[in-house]
Protein backbone atom coordinates (compact mmCIF):
# COMPACT_ATOMS: atom_id res chain seq x y z
CA UNK A 1 0.00 0.00 0.00
CA UNK A 2 1.23 3.46 -0.83
CA UNK A 3 2.52 5.61 2.02
CA UNK A 4 0.91 8.80 0.71
CA UNK A 5 -2.78 8.27 1.38
CA UNK A 6 -5.11 11.26 1.36
CA UNK A 7 -6.00 12.22 4.96
CA UNK A 8 -9.60 11.76 6.02
CA UNK A 9 -11.94 14.70 6.60
CA UNK A 10 -11.61 14.55 10.37
CA UNK A 11 -7.82 14.75 10.13
CA UNK A 12 -7.95 17.78 7.84
CA UNK A 13 -10.26 19.67 10.18
CA UNK A 14 -9.03 18.43 13.56
CA UNK A 15 -6.19 20.94 13.79
CA UNK A 16 -3.94 22.91 11.51
CA UNK A 17 -0.81 22.59 13.58
CA UNK A 18 2.24 20.91 12.10
CA UNK A 19 3.05 17.56 13.74
CA UNK A 20 5.80 17.52 16.32
CA UNK A 21 9.13 15.82 15.76
CA UNK A 22 8.03 13.04 18.12
CA UNK A 23 4.86 12.46 16.09
CA UNK A 24 6.87 12.42 12.87
CA UNK A 25 9.24 9.82 14.31
CA UNK A 26 6.33 7.73 15.56
CA UNK A 27 4.58 7.90 12.20
CA UNK A 28 7.74 6.84 10.39
CA UNK A 29 8.14 3.96 12.84
CA UNK A 30 4.57 2.80 12.16
CA UNK A 31 4.99 3.06 8.39
CA UNK A 32 8.21 1.10 8.56
CA UNK A 33 6.45 -1.64 10.54
CA UNK A 34 3.69 -1.64 7.91
CA UNK A 35 6.19 -1.97 5.03
CA UNK A 36 7.84 -4.87 6.82
CA UNK A 37 4.46 -6.27 7.90
CA UNK A 38 5.89 -6.55 11.41
CA UNK A 39 2.92 -7.69 13.46
CA UNK A 40 4.73 -7.66 16.78
CA UNK A 41 5.79 -4.05 16.28
CA UNK A 42 2.31 -2.97 15.15
CA UNK A 43 0.66 -4.64 18.13
CA UNK A 44 3.03 -2.93 20.52
CA UNK A 45 2.47 0.46 18.89
CA UNK A 46 -1.31 -0.02 18.85
CA UNK A 47 -1.31 -0.52 22.61
CA UNK A 48 1.07 2.34 23.40
CA UNK A 49 -0.27 5.87 24.00
CA UNK A 50 -1.58 7.48 20.84
CA UNK A 51 -1.93 4.27 18.84
CA UNK A 52 -1.61 4.84 15.11
CA UNK A 53 -2.11 8.61 15.38
CA UNK A 54 -4.13 9.32 12.21
CA UNK A 55 -6.62 7.65 9.90
CA UNK A 56 -4.20 7.80 6.98
CA UNK A 57 -1.77 5.65 8.95
CA UNK A 58 -4.59 3.37 10.08
CA UNK A 59 -5.40 2.72 6.44
CA UNK A 60 -2.12 0.85 6.27
CA UNK A 61 -1.92 -0.66 9.74
CA UNK A 62 -5.46 -2.01 10.19
CA UNK A 63 -5.48 -4.24 7.08
CA UNK A 64 -2.26 -5.87 8.26
CA UNK A 65 -3.68 -6.49 11.73
CA UNK A 66 -6.78 -7.97 10.08
CA UNK A 67 -4.64 -10.34 8.01
CA UNK A 68 -5.36 -8.87 4.58
CA UNK A 69 -2.74 -9.52 1.87
CA UNK A 70 -0.29 -6.80 0.80
CA UNK A 71 -2.20 -5.78 -2.31
CA UNK A 72 -5.86 -5.99 -3.30
CA UNK A 73 -7.33 -5.10 -6.67
CA UNK A 74 -10.94 -5.03 -5.50
CA UNK A 75 -11.87 -7.88 -7.85
CA UNK A 76 -10.15 -11.03 -6.71
CA UNK A 77 -9.80 -10.71 -2.97
CA UNK A 78 -9.16 -13.74 -0.79
CA UNK A 79 -12.17 -15.54 0.61
CA UNK A 80 -14.35 -14.20 -2.22
CA UNK A 81 -14.88 -10.97 -0.34
CA UNK A 82 -15.44 -8.67 -3.30
CA UNK A 83 -17.58 -9.09 -6.38
CA UNK A 84 -19.89 -6.92 -8.41
CA UNK A 85 -22.73 -9.46 -8.46
CA UNK A 86 -23.88 -9.39 -4.84
CA UNK A 87 -27.16 -7.69 -5.87
CA UNK A 88 -28.26 -10.87 -7.65
CA UNK A 89 -27.78 -13.04 -4.56
CA UNK A 90 -30.81 -14.05 -2.45
CA UNK A 91 -32.00 -11.49 0.05
CA UNK A 92 -30.77 -11.99 3.61
CA UNK A 93 -33.60 -12.26 6.18
CA UNK A 94 -32.07 -9.52 8.35
CA UNK A 95 -31.94 -6.80 5.70
CA UNK A 96 -34.97 -4.92 7.03
CA UNK A 97 -33.27 -4.57 10.41
CA UNK A 98 -30.07 -3.47 8.70
CA UNK A 99 -31.92 -0.63 7.02
CA UNK A 100 -33.56 0.45 10.28
CA UNK A 101 -30.16 0.64 11.94
CA UNK A 102 -28.46 2.36 9.01
CA UNK A 103 -31.16 5.04 9.14
CA UNK A 104 -29.89 5.83 12.66
CA UNK A 105 -26.20 5.83 11.73
CA UNK A 106 -23.74 8.75 11.63
CA UNK A 107 -25.44 10.62 14.49
CA UNK A 108 -22.27 11.86 16.18
CA UNK A 109 -19.66 11.78 13.44
CA UNK A 110 -18.37 12.75 10.96
CA UNK A 111 -19.23 16.37 11.76
CA UNK A 112 -20.70 19.03 9.49
CA UNK A 113 -22.29 16.65 6.99
CA UNK A 114 -24.83 18.04 4.54
CA UNK A 115 -28.04 16.04 4.04
CA UNK A 116 -26.79 14.77 0.68
CA UNK A 117 -23.44 13.72 2.18
CA UNK A 118 -25.20 11.94 5.02
CA UNK A 119 -27.51 10.12 2.61
CA UNK A 120 -24.50 9.03 0.58
CA UNK A 121 -22.71 7.71 3.69
CA UNK A 122 -25.80 5.74 4.70
CA UNK A 123 -26.08 4.25 1.22
CA UNK A 124 -22.44 3.14 1.36
CA UNK A 125 -22.95 1.63 4.81
CA UNK A 126 -26.07 -0.26 3.76
CA UNK A 127 -24.31 -1.63 0.70
CA UNK A 128 -21.30 -2.70 2.75
CA UNK A 129 -23.36 -4.64 5.28
CA UNK A 130 -25.92 -6.16 2.90
CA UNK A 131 -23.27 -7.27 0.40
CA UNK A 132 -21.46 -9.10 3.20
CA UNK A 133 -24.62 -10.76 4.52
CA UNK A 134 -25.70 -11.93 1.08
CA UNK A 135 -22.29 -13.45 0.44
CA UNK A 136 -22.26 -15.14 3.83
CA UNK A 137 -25.96 -15.79 4.51
CA UNK A 138 -25.27 -18.09 7.48
CA UNK A 139 -24.11 -15.05 9.48
CA UNK A 140 -26.81 -13.45 11.63
CA UNK A 141 -26.93 -9.68 11.82
CA UNK A 142 -27.14 -8.12 15.28
CA UNK A 143 -28.17 -4.62 16.28
CA UNK A 144 -25.01 -2.59 16.70
CA UNK A 145 -23.15 -4.36 13.89
CA UNK A 146 -23.70 -1.25 11.81
CA UNK A 147 -21.74 0.76 14.38
CA UNK A 148 -18.70 -1.47 13.84
CA UNK A 149 -19.08 -1.32 10.06
CA UNK A 150 -19.42 2.45 10.24
CA UNK A 151 -15.96 2.80 11.81
CA UNK A 152 -14.34 0.70 9.08
CA UNK A 153 -16.19 2.65 6.40
CA UNK A 154 -14.98 5.99 7.73
CA UNK A 155 -11.35 4.93 8.15
CA UNK A 156 -10.52 2.48 5.36
CA UNK A 157 -10.45 3.16 1.61
CA UNK A 158 -13.33 1.66 -0.43
CA UNK A 159 -11.38 -1.28 -1.85
CA UNK A 160 -10.50 -2.60 1.63
CA UNK A 161 -13.75 -2.14 3.54
CA UNK A 162 -15.59 -5.32 2.61
CA UNK A 163 -12.57 -7.58 2.93
CA UNK A 164 -11.78 -6.06 6.33
CA UNK A 165 -15.36 -6.41 7.59
CA UNK A 166 -15.53 -9.98 6.29
CA UNK A 167 -12.47 -11.08 8.23
CA UNK A 168 -13.55 -9.13 11.30
CA UNK A 169 -16.96 -10.83 11.23
CA UNK A 170 -15.57 -14.35 10.91
CA UNK A 171 -12.46 -14.10 13.04
CA UNK A 172 -13.12 -11.47 15.72
CA UNK A 173 -16.84 -10.98 16.42
CA UNK A 174 -18.09 -14.35 15.14
CA UNK A 175 -19.72 -15.28 18.47
CA UNK A 176 -22.17 -12.39 18.06
CA UNK A 177 -23.26 -13.49 14.57
CA UNK A 178 -24.51 -16.90 15.66
CA UNK A 179 -28.25 -17.71 15.75
CA UNK A 180 -28.25 -17.50 19.56
CA UNK A 181 -27.22 -14.86 22.06
CA UNK A 182 -25.89 -17.45 24.52
CA UNK A 183 -22.24 -17.27 23.31
CA UNK A 184 -22.31 -13.50 23.89
CA UNK A 185 -23.72 -14.08 27.38
CA UNK A 186 -20.96 -16.62 28.03
CA UNK A 187 -18.39 -13.92 27.34
CA UNK A 188 -20.07 -11.63 29.87
CA UNK A 189 -19.67 -14.26 32.58
CA UNK A 190 -15.93 -13.60 32.52
CA UNK A 191 -16.43 -10.08 33.90
CA UNK A 192 -17.73 -10.94 37.42
CA UNK A 193 -14.96 -13.51 37.87
CA UNK A 194 -12.36 -11.04 36.68
CA UNK A 195 -13.62 -8.28 38.98
CA UNK A 196 -13.81 -10.65 41.93
CA UNK A 197 -10.11 -11.39 41.49
CA UNK A 198 -9.02 -7.82 40.80
CA UNK A 199 -11.14 -6.11 43.48
CA UNK A 200 -13.15 -8.48 45.71
CA UNK A 201 -14.69 -5.66 47.76
CA UNK A 202 -15.95 -3.84 44.69
CA UNK A 203 -17.45 -6.97 43.20
CA UNK A 204 -19.22 -7.84 46.44
CA UNK A 205 -20.79 -4.41 46.22
CA UNK A 206 -21.87 -5.07 42.62
CA UNK A 207 -22.80 -8.72 43.02
CA UNK A 208 -26.56 -8.12 42.93
CA UNK A 209 -26.24 -6.92 39.32
CA UNK A 210 -25.96 -9.20 36.32
CA UNK A 211 -23.18 -8.60 33.76
CA UNK A 212 -25.68 -7.72 31.03
CA UNK A 213 -24.61 -4.13 31.64
CA UNK A 214 -21.56 -4.88 29.45
CA UNK A 215 -23.48 -6.34 26.51
CA UNK A 216 -23.71 -3.22 24.36
CA UNK A 217 -20.05 -2.32 24.79
CA UNK A 218 -18.56 -5.75 24.21
CA UNK A 219 -21.01 -6.64 21.44
CA UNK A 220 -20.12 -3.60 19.32
CA UNK A 221 -16.43 -3.17 20.20
CA UNK A 222 -17.66 -0.02 22.00
CA UNK A 223 -18.59 1.61 18.69
CA UNK A 224 -22.21 2.03 19.82
CA UNK A 225 -21.29 3.87 23.00
CA UNK A 226 -18.25 6.00 22.18
CA UNK A 227 -19.42 9.18 20.46
CA UNK A 228 -16.08 10.59 19.31
CA UNK A 229 -14.66 9.42 15.98
CA UNK A 230 -11.14 10.09 17.22
CA UNK A 231 -11.68 8.01 20.38
CA UNK A 232 -13.33 5.04 18.69
CA UNK A 233 -10.66 4.91 15.99
CA UNK A 234 -8.00 4.96 18.69
CA UNK A 235 -9.85 2.20 20.54
CA UNK A 236 -10.05 0.10 17.38
CA UNK A 237 -6.26 0.33 17.08
CA UNK A 238 -5.85 -1.80 20.17
CA UNK A 239 -8.96 -3.96 19.74
CA UNK A 240 -7.79 -5.08 16.30
CA UNK A 241 -4.30 -5.73 17.64
CA UNK A 242 -5.32 -7.78 20.69
CA UNK A 243 -7.25 -11.00 21.14
CA UNK A 244 -11.06 -10.63 21.07
CA UNK A 245 -11.10 -11.31 24.83
CA UNK A 246 -9.52 -7.90 25.34
CA UNK A 247 -12.95 -6.25 25.04
CA UNK A 248 -13.94 -7.99 28.29
CA UNK A 249 -10.81 -6.81 30.08
CA UNK A 250 -11.40 -3.30 28.81
CA UNK A 251 -14.87 -3.23 30.37
CA UNK A 252 -13.48 -4.55 33.63
CA UNK A 253 -10.90 -1.74 33.56
CA UNK A 254 -13.74 0.76 33.06
CA UNK A 255 -15.54 -0.62 36.11
CA UNK A 256 -12.40 -0.40 38.22
CA UNK A 257 -11.78 3.16 37.05
CA UNK A 258 -15.12 4.23 38.55
CA UNK A 259 -14.66 2.35 41.80
CA UNK A 260 -15.38 5.32 44.09
CA UNK A 261 -18.59 6.31 42.31
CA UNK A 262 -19.87 2.75 42.28
CA UNK A 263 -19.11 2.15 45.96
CA UNK A 264 -20.91 5.39 46.80
CA UNK A 265 -24.08 4.00 45.21
CA UNK A 266 -26.18 1.81 47.55
CA UNK A 267 -25.68 -1.90 46.98
CA UNK A 268 -29.38 -2.56 47.42
CA UNK A 269 -30.20 -0.47 44.34
CA UNK A 270 -29.06 -2.86 41.60
CA UNK A 271 -31.12 -1.08 38.95
CA UNK A 272 -29.24 2.16 39.57
CA UNK A 273 -25.92 0.35 39.59
CA UNK A 274 -26.84 -1.40 36.36
CA UNK A 275 -27.65 1.93 34.76
CA UNK A 276 -24.31 3.40 35.86
CA UNK A 277 -22.38 0.38 34.65
CA UNK A 278 -24.08 0.27 31.25
CA UNK A 279 -23.11 3.91 30.65
CA UNK A 280 -19.46 3.39 31.50
CA UNK A 281 -18.11 3.11 27.91
CA UNK A 282 -19.42 6.54 26.99
CA UNK A 283 -18.36 8.16 30.25
CA UNK A 284 -15.05 6.40 30.84
CA UNK A 285 -13.29 7.68 27.72
CA UNK A 286 -14.47 11.27 28.09
CA UNK A 287 -11.70 12.78 30.26
CA UNK A 288 -8.47 13.66 28.40
CA UNK A 289 -6.00 10.75 28.26
CA UNK A 290 -8.40 8.51 30.21
CA UNK A 291 -8.69 6.16 27.27
CA UNK A 292 -4.96 5.51 27.35
CA UNK A 293 -5.14 4.69 31.05
CA UNK A 294 -8.00 2.28 30.38
CA UNK A 295 -6.04 0.49 27.67
CA UNK A 296 -3.02 0.17 29.94
CA UNK A 297 -5.23 -0.98 32.81
CA UNK A 298 -6.92 -3.63 30.68
CA UNK A 299 -3.55 -4.94 29.47
CA UNK A 300 -2.35 -5.16 33.08
CA UNK A 301 -5.51 -7.04 34.08
CA UNK A 302 -5.04 -9.58 31.31
CA UNK A 303 -1.40 -10.09 32.29
CA UNK A 304 -2.35 -10.63 35.95
CA UNK A 305 -5.48 -12.71 35.34
CA UNK A 306 -5.33 -14.44 31.92
CA UNK A 307 -8.66 -15.80 30.70
CA UNK A 308 -7.47 -19.38 31.09
CA UNK A 309 -7.43 -18.79 34.86
CA UNK A 310 -11.14 -17.94 34.94
CA UNK A 311 -13.64 -20.78 35.60
CA UNK A 312 -16.14 -19.36 33.10
CA UNK A 313 -13.49 -19.59 30.38
CA UNK A 314 -13.32 -23.33 30.96
CA UNK A 315 -16.97 -23.99 31.77
CA UNK A 316 -19.03 -21.46 29.79
CA UNK A 317 -16.98 -20.43 26.75
CA UNK A 318 -17.20 -22.88 23.85
CA UNK A 319 -14.03 -24.42 22.48
CA UNK A 320 -15.15 -23.02 19.11
CA UNK A 321 -15.70 -19.53 20.47
CA UNK A 322 -13.72 -16.79 18.78
CA UNK A 323 -12.24 -16.04 22.20
CA UNK A 324 -10.43 -19.37 22.10
CA UNK A 325 -9.76 -19.85 18.39
CA UNK A 326 -8.07 -16.43 18.23
CA UNK A 327 -6.25 -16.80 21.53
CA UNK A 328 -2.80 -17.52 20.05
CA UNK A 329 -1.67 -14.39 18.20
CA UNK A 330 0.37 -15.09 15.10
CA UNK A 331 -0.54 -18.79 15.10
CA UNK A 332 -4.28 -19.26 15.09
CA UNK A 333 -5.69 -15.80 15.51
CA UNK A 334 -7.43 -13.35 13.24
CA UNK A 335 -4.14 -11.53 12.69
CA UNK A 336 -2.62 -14.53 10.93
CA UNK A 337 -3.34 -14.26 7.18
CA UNK A 338 -3.09 -18.05 6.91
CA UNK A 339 -6.32 -18.32 8.89
CA UNK A 340 -8.99 -17.46 6.36
CA UNK A 341 -12.69 -16.82 6.26
CA UNK A 342 -13.42 -20.44 5.39
CA UNK A 343 -11.75 -21.55 8.61
CA UNK A 344 -13.85 -18.99 10.45
CA UNK A 345 -16.95 -20.43 8.82
CA UNK A 346 -15.91 -23.95 9.88
CA UNK A 347 -15.61 -22.81 13.48
CA UNK A 348 -18.95 -21.01 13.12
CA UNK A 349 -20.67 -24.22 11.95
CA UNK A 350 -19.14 -26.27 14.77
CA UNK A 351 -20.47 -23.78 17.29
CA UNK A 352 -23.90 -23.80 15.65
CA UNK A 353 -23.91 -27.59 15.96
CA UNK A 354 -22.98 -27.26 19.62
CA UNK A 355 -25.80 -24.77 20.20
CA UNK A 356 -28.31 -27.08 18.53
CA UNK A 357 -27.15 -29.98 20.67
CA UNK A 358 -27.65 -27.90 23.81
CA UNK A 359 -31.15 -27.02 22.60
CA UNK A 360 -31.94 -30.71 22.07
CA UNK A 361 -30.77 -31.52 25.60
CA UNK A 362 -33.10 -28.85 26.95
CA UNK A 363 -35.98 -30.36 25.01
CA UNK A 364 -35.17 -33.82 26.40
CA UNK A 365 -35.23 -32.43 29.93
CA UNK A 366 -38.55 -30.73 29.29
CA UNK A 367 -39.97 -33.96 27.87
CA UNK A 368 -38.85 -35.94 30.91
CA UNK A 369 -40.36 -33.33 33.22
CA UNK A 370 -43.69 -33.40 31.42
CA UNK A 371 -43.83 -37.21 31.63
CA UNK A 372 -42.40 -37.56 35.10
CA UNK A 373 -43.70 -40.03 37.66
CA UNK A 374 -43.41 -39.58 41.42
CA UNK A 375 -41.34 -42.74 41.84
CA UNK A 376 -38.33 -43.89 39.93
CA UNK A 377 -37.41 -40.56 38.37
CA UNK A 378 -33.73 -41.12 39.08
CA UNK A 379 -33.81 -44.25 36.97
CA UNK A 380 -35.62 -42.42 34.20
CA UNK A 381 -33.04 -39.64 34.28
CA UNK A 382 -30.22 -42.17 33.94
CA UNK A 383 -31.95 -43.80 30.99
CA UNK A 384 -32.51 -40.44 29.33
CA UNK A 385 -28.83 -39.63 29.80
CA UNK A 386 -27.84 -42.90 28.13
CA UNK A 387 -30.29 -42.22 25.34
CA UNK A 388 -28.90 -38.72 24.82
CA UNK A 389 -25.34 -40.02 24.54
CA UNK A 390 -26.37 -42.67 22.05
CA UNK A 391 -28.30 -40.13 20.00
CA UNK A 392 -25.34 -37.79 19.94
CA UNK A 393 -23.06 -40.51 18.56
CA UNK A 394 -25.39 -41.11 15.62
CA UNK A 395 -26.45 -44.42 13.97
CA UNK A 396 -25.16 -47.46 15.79
CA UNK A 397 -24.42 -50.79 14.05
CA UNK A 398 -24.82 -54.32 15.29
CA UNK A 399 -25.02 -54.99 19.03
CA UNK A 400 -24.92 -51.28 19.83
CA UNK A 401 -28.06 -50.76 17.78
CA UNK A 402 -29.85 -53.51 19.68
CA UNK A 403 -28.69 -51.88 22.92
CA UNK A 404 -30.15 -48.62 21.71
CA UNK A 405 -33.43 -50.38 20.97
CA UNK A 406 -33.42 -51.93 24.41
CA UNK A 407 -32.93 -48.55 26.12
CA UNK A 408 -35.60 -46.84 24.02
CA UNK A 409 -37.96 -49.73 24.73
CA UNK A 410 -37.40 -49.36 28.43
CA UNK A 411 -38.15 -45.67 28.19
CA UNK A 412 -41.30 -46.32 26.23
CA UNK A 413 -42.55 -48.79 28.85
CA UNK A 414 -41.55 -46.45 31.69
CA UNK A 415 -43.55 -43.52 30.31
CA UNK A 416 -46.69 -45.52 29.48
Image (spheres, rainbow, N blue to C red):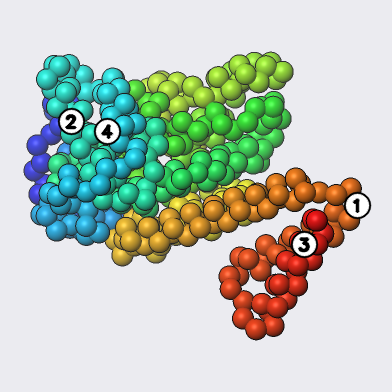
- State the image coordinates of residue 269 (x, y, percent, origin top left): 67, 16
Does dot 4 land on a helix, a strand or a loop?
helix
Which residue is denoted by mark 1 in the rendering? 375
4 or 2: mark nearer the eye: 2
Under circle 1, the secondary element is loop
Mark 3 or mark 4: whose residue is earlier in sequence: 4
Furthest-front residue in view? 416
Q: Name the foreground residue: 278 vs 10.
A: 278
Q: Give the crowd class for mark 4: few <14, some 14-19, many >=20 residues within 10 Å.
A: many
Quadrant in the picture for residue 393:
bottom right
Please rate how many residues cluster around mark 1, counting C-alpha atoms within 10 Å: few if below 14, some from 14 to 19, many from 20.
Answer: few
Q: Is mark 3 on a helix, strand or loop?
A: helix
Q: How far is disc 3 from disc 1 in space, using C-alphas?
A: 14 Å
Q: Depth check: 125 or 154 in front?
A: 125
Percent x, y of residue 304: 57, 47
Q: At 33% from the left edge and 61% from the top edge, which residue is drawn?
A: 342
Q: Mark 3 = which residue? A: 411
Write down the residue under mark 4.
150
Q: Is residue 26 visible?
A: no
- Residue at image position (37%, 62%) is 343
The vertical placement of 313 against 389, above or below, is above
Relative placement, left or right, of 118 versus 147 is left
Residue 100, placed above or below residue 149: above
Instruction: Check disc 2 and report the residue beneath it.
Output: 123
Marked residue nearer the N-terminal end (1 or 2): 2
**In the image, residue 8 lies at what x, y percent?**
15, 32
- Spatial CA distance of label 1 from label 4 is 59 Å
Q: In which quarter of the image is residue 225?
A: top left
Residue 350 placement (x, y as % from top left): 47, 60
The first of marks 4 and 2 along the sequence is: 2
Real-space Cα distance between discs 3 and 2?
Answer: 58 Å
Amino acid sequence: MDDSIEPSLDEKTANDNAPSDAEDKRKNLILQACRQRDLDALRAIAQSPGGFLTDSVRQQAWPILLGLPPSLDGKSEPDGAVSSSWESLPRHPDEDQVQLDVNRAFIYYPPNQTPSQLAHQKSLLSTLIVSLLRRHPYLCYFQGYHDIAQVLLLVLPPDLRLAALTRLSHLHIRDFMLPSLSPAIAQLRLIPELLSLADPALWRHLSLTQPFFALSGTLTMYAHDVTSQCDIARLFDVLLARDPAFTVYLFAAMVLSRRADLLATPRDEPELLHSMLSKLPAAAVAPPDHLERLVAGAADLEARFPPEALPAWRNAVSRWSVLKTARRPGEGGMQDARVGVEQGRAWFEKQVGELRWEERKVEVRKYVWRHRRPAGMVGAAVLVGVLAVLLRRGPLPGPAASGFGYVSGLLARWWR
